[in-house]
Image (spheres, rainbow, N blue to C red):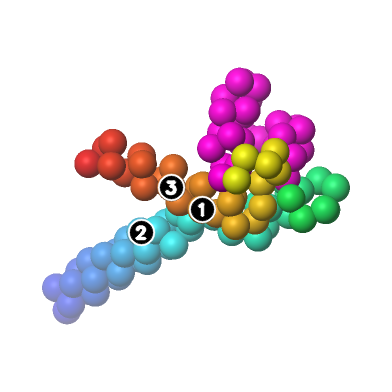
Amino acid sequence: MKSIHLKLSIVSIIFLACSFSMSAQERKEPDFDKMFKRLDANKDGSISLEEFKSAKRKKEVPAERLEKNFAHLDADENGMVTREELEEGWKKAKNKKKKKQG
């Protein structure tokens, strides 16, 4: 009887661990619509450099780095980042990071 309880406990722990790991993987890609809406302060459908720099972040990021990141996102170099550019730029940066690591 103890053996059955032990086996069930182990299976439950493994299942729980797998559930957490799958949830973490699902959360890796951000909600681009939500991110864009947060960054587009004046709600004109694009993000300016000033909006990008003034957005609240969890960590302090130097202005120079923000400007560089913005330039990478602004694919057509018109000084504004669209929702599509935001997502494509994020994916390109993520793929570039993966290539460096692997």
Give the residue type at disc 2.
Answer: Ser
Label 3 vs label 2: CA separation?
Answer: 24 Å
Q: Position of residue 3 (x, y in %)?
A: 14, 73
In which quarter of the view is residue 8 placed?
bottom left
Write the residue at 56% across / 28% down. Answer: 68
Residue 30 percent coordinates (x, y): 54, 55
Q: Which mark is residue 88?
A: 1
Callout 2 environment at 10 Å: few (<14), some (14 to 19), or many (20+)? few
Between the residue at mark 3 and the residue at mark 1, the CA separation in whole angstroms equals 6 Å
Circle 3 SS class? helix
Residue 100 appears anywhere in the view:
yes
Circle nearer the N terminus (3, 2): 2
Q: Which residue is mark 3?
A: 92
Q: Is residue 23 left or right of residue 73?
A: left
- Using the image, determine if residue 24 lies above or below residue 100: below
Up-down: is 4 above or below 16? below
- Dot 2 or dot 1: first in sequence order is 2
In percent of width and height, residue 83 lies at 65, 56
